[in-house]
Amino acid sequence: MTLKGRSLVTIDDLTTGEIGAVFSAADEMAAAIGEQSKLCKGKIMASLFFEPSTRTRLSFEAAMYRLGGNVITAVDIGATSLAKGESLSDMARIVGSYADIIVIRHPWEGAAKVVADYAGVPVINAGDGGHQHPTQTLLDLYTIRKERKTIKGLKIALWGDLKYGRTIHSLVFALAKFGANILFCPTPGLEVPEHILQKLVTEYGGEIEKCKPAKQTGEEKVFPLDAIYTTPTSSHQLAMMPDVNLSLDLGKGVDAIYVTRPQKERFEASESELTNQYQVVDKKLLKGKEFRSTLVMHPLPRVDELAYDLDTDPRSQYFKQAAYGVPVRMAILALLSGAKPVPVPENETTEVKVAFTVYNRDSGLKCSNPKCVSIQKTELKYLRPEFKIVNREPLTLRCVYCEHGFEPKYIASTEWHEGKVINKKYHPSDSHWARTIKPENLIIFASAADAEAQGFKPNHYMGGKH
Amino acid sequence: MTLKGRSLVTIDDLTTGEIGAVFSAADEMAAAIGEQSKLCKGKIMASLFFEPSTRTRLSFEAAMYRLGGNVITAVDIGATSLAKGESLSDMARIVGSYADIIVIRHPWEGAAKVVADYAGVPVINAGDGGHQHPTQTLLDLYTIRKERKTIKGLKIALWGDLKYGRTIHSLVFALAKFGANILFCPTPGLEVPEHILQKLVTEYGGEIEKCKPAKQTGEEKVFPLDAIYTTPTSSHQLAMMPDVNLSLDLGKGVDAIYVTRPQKERFEASESELTNQYQVVDKKLLKGKEFRSTLVMHPLPRVDELAYDLDTDPRSQYFKQAAYGVPVRMAILALLSGAKPVPVPENETTEVKVAFTVYNRDSGLKCSNPKCVSIQKTELKYLRPEFKIVNREPLTLRCVYCEHGFEPKYIASTEWHEGKVINKKYHPSDSHWARTIKPENLIIFASAADAEAQGFKPNHYMGGKH
Amino acid sequence: MTLKGRSLVTIDDLTTGEIGAVFSAADEMAAAIGEQSKLCKGKIMASLFFEPSTRTRLSFEAAMYRLGGNVITAVDIGATSLAKGESLSDMARIVGSYADIIVIRHPWEGAAKVVADYAGVPVINAGDGGHQHPTQTLLDLYTIRKERKTIKGLKIALWGDLKYGRTIHSLVFALAKFGANILFCPTPGLEVPEHILQKLVTEYGGEIEKCKPAKQTGEEKVFPLDAIYTTPTSSHQLAMMPDVNLSLDLGKGVDAIYVTRPQKERFEASESELTNQYQVVDKKLLKGKEFRSTLVMHPLPRVDELAYDLDTDPRSQYFKQAAYGVPVRMAILALLSGAKPVPVPENETTEVKVAFTVYNRDSGLKCSNPKCVSIQKTELKYLRPEFKIVNREPLTLRCVYCEHGFEPKYIASTEWHEGKVINKKYHPSDSHWARTIKPENLIIFASAADAEAQGFKPNHYMGGKH
């Protein structure tokens, strides 16, 4: 097994075995942080931050320097070439000819994948919009594993803004991969996006149980559970329990509570008031016995959602998390750049990814996520939309860039119209005609108008439906 | 004596002996600047600039690279985490887990102390608002000592904006520490703050003589003396002389004139016109015999207050000052990081600092300086106001963060009300009651309203006074 | 021959032989890019970018790190010292005392010369307004030479914004120096400035042939030739050919087409619509046989002027160009810093520069280019305007800073008025009197008003002319 030359765009790019190898390397780094300065000697890391950040960037740069390498940095690039209209792919190719490895943060979802596709050198995603932040996830997992030895079977509560927090969106898949149970405790209105829950079920095989709103019984609602994810191997007793018994099971203890700040910078106008409902995590909230040995985690920076009275509490892990950022990133840099050979771990899981049909026909279909890299003006010049067909009923596509899912309403078939103009018909994607089309023959339209713009006529059976 | 692990927040953090050790190390650095690259090998300096700066930051970074170390830099951090509401203490803890030493510039006065309190690694203040800039002071002193061999007994004129120039606010204490006399020559309206003069007298034991305004006799007013500080060991003849004879003594020569630019960025609206009265220092001004061998100094950047016609004048030191910034900062970095052991200098002065009573009771008292770090919204969440009681008549507190002094108007005593509600009375701080309270029993209020808000009643003797 | 300690402000600072030496060094660097890390060990490069840039800066910084050196960087310095009113010369002196070599980009034309005049260390111009960008030119030439072995006799087409593109303004002189023919193909309204054509003729001795506008014959106007520069040694057959035959000769093939983006950030308000006429270079445009083996070049970033369909075309060189930036800049840094001795190349051309009379008399004459460094408020305090007299009929001056040419309208003679007030007369610069004045006696005025302000009277022969 080797990680040399590989990129890390989403947490799915690493198997559990590879993550284990990263952690072993991080252990080595942490044990003798001052003695790694030969590993990346002569290597250059490019640090491209299109969104303001200090913590993550400095952590990566410190990691590269600890490895003896050098760093070229561009921050707040909004004002430079990109403003001149340059595409991400041009930037990627050029910086890829200067540096040996690239770290990128960008507000567009899927941006890191584009850079990885064009750079010609390994690329590490340091946050792409609300999509993913896989190295944060690695250090989060590393922290949990340090304290609990294993991740399998743990109960991890995710707290706060689960809608826009990209650290959450990486973390859930990693937790699922390692067999943890996830308690979703969002601030109302900031629930985890449906496409993420769907992916958990479709690809990780666990189950999602939606919880009923807490009863208005006057009892303190300390734990605003919205949904529970249980792993396929779990006994399901947690998920199956009626809401009323949930507290009993939680009484056995929550292993970690992962708090996130409201990502106000990504809020839509209508969401600006949601922070009023943010429940602060403090000593008082965590006084129950189910929290007696709960790890209190936060990717930082915090604003008001995590109280300072926990700073000296032995349960608090957040400053440790931040500190682990350096050895974990050293490990990632060393492995991807090929500076360090990876020992094959014994507990390597053979992960079989679900193989979805890819849809990339030029039928005018575009990703519906306004923050997706694939629909930005500068990128449209060369990027071709591409989707995975992750479900047929209802027909559901997932963008390969930003991984947002959506359900297009109309379809046609390549078979029906090859040379036969009369059959150039389009159908509702939930019609019985739709089900009969082979995946490889699908033509998919975002709207009836799109279909008609391409010369398709409504199926006469559609009637008033379209 | 060791400086390893120590921080440099104000110039008072170093004794004269320790400053001497820094200078010896700087001499060594300057003598072989290319041969120091093993000293800080593998070490990382974090350079955190919350205010724009080029000169100071580049000087520190060049120094660290000359020592063989590495640098992680964040500039103009206004747009990043702090804007998301993060506190300085969180930032300090996190960056302290990435780097071996931190250099910080920040617009809030006292910010460097907060960072030093939480970082866990040595912190160097590179300017905190109008408070201090101790490494600038070290290179200023180093320049003077290079040219004059000693600082003791010299006459140093400070020129221009003495109100907002933080280099001035560090320099006066260093000059006093080494026994120099100080001639304050402010642009009218930009006099040195009272709390600084007070500290000079209280802690350095010298005397301040205020000068009468220059007579309107038609003679050229080359030297707008506002106040003179004479060291305790001086013969007092300078300070005691009536104004009319002052020029005779100055005729023996001013050793250095230290010019500063107007710090317009810190001016209040009402002060915007003050630069019109700024007197330019040029060859003409310095044609008198008292300036024959005066060192012309400036921390740079200059605007219009220092003429280019002095650039080639042998008296000019300002470009030399800037150049000394590198070896002096190399010395500081090497000593604080522990990279270089400090030889104990023979001329070590045993400095006895005045031990003031500390006041940090939670009586609603806050620092009155609007730029003080301790009253900022993000810092209020965890910072506890703390003051030194530097005088009793009038009662004068000095904030431990920004070192601004102020005179609170009302007090009470813990003895009077312990269990005795009837005695929960507050008094004017200049009343005879006030004088009888032991320092350790003092409760101090900013206003009568604050006192009453905490359940205290006015002393009936106060009458109309409160 | 040594380049140690030299600056690179314009491409004229290097002879063809020296450029050859740079290329040999670049070849060595490229052949073993990972083995150069001892060359600049311990050296510091300062990277001062007063204009946003990512590509050029990162390329220089990567180059310095590949050489084992270190980098101190200041970007977007608009907000810092300069905003406080500091001059370039002060900045240059100070940074020159921190670093061993300086790389500067600045919006003012001639800024790099000022920095080079004051820094005391070698300075490399990384772009000064619309003036020059000599290292870009070196990598452009290097790319051509790699592909064609020689530059002499090639036909190079320059395409797009030839008015504001500084890469163009450096490149034309380099091409002329090496004996290439230049085909100017500007977007209408963005023709190459007259002073550049003039310098080509005056100093490089070639000829400029202006082309007639393409006939409106309905035939596709693929190649909007505006002017042709032919080298002095060429047979002139290209330039002499009537327009109608031009295509025949071009049929032998254009060696390279050098496309530039519209430099919108330098456009005047009236020019904002010019990009509408920008002709896109794409596969279709280059389908003619004269382009069969044309090198397609672009300094990047591109916007819409160069189509993505050429990216995989074997003629395209632009990503290679960018990649060559690193070894070429490594070579320059190593040679100017003295880290690498320069072998004297055998084919060294003894270049005799034209020796022009210098005019720097204080007659109130200022450079007419509003972007010239010499007329900026902060620089006026110390800079003295200076011009080369590059022509007498009409009298033409070239600013030594920005190299813009202009034709002042009035003159006088120092001989005529020394002690003789009656002769303090000024004359139109195109009058017969003007021709009789020796260059060293010239007094030059921008306007009659300027002349009169200095006590000169109009020559009575002037009549209504002034």
Image (cartoon, coloured by chain):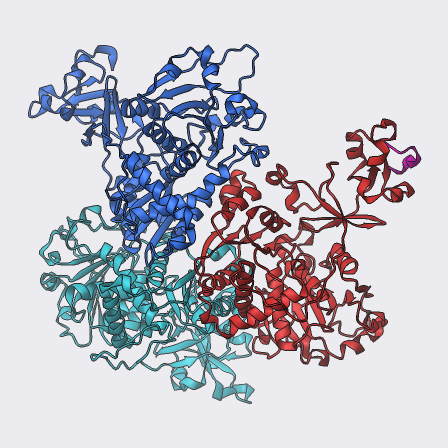
Chain colours: A blue, B red, C cyan
Left/right of residue C211 with respect to residue C407 in the rendered view: left
Q: Nearer the viewer, residue C359 or C95?
A: C95
Which quarter of the rendered picture does the C terminus of chain B lie within?
Answer: top right
Position of residue C335 relative to residue B96, above or below, is below
Where residue B315 sits, quadrant-wise, is: bottom right
Position of residue B324 relative to residue A243, above or below, is below
Is residue B461 magenta-colored? Answer: yes
Q: Residue at x 40, y 16 (%)?
A: A238
Left/right of residue C298 with respect to residue A436 in the rendered view: right
Q: How many marks?
A: 0
Outermost residue to the left? A419
Q: Magenta region, mostly helix, strand or loop?
A: helix
Q: Residue at x 79, y 62 (%)?
A: B205
Q: Residue at x 39, y 80 (%)?
A: C431
Could you tell me residue A272's position as x and y percent?
Answer: 50, 28
Instruction: Look at the image and give the residue range highlighted in magenta.
Output: B457-466
Where residue A191 sits, quadrant-wise, is: top left
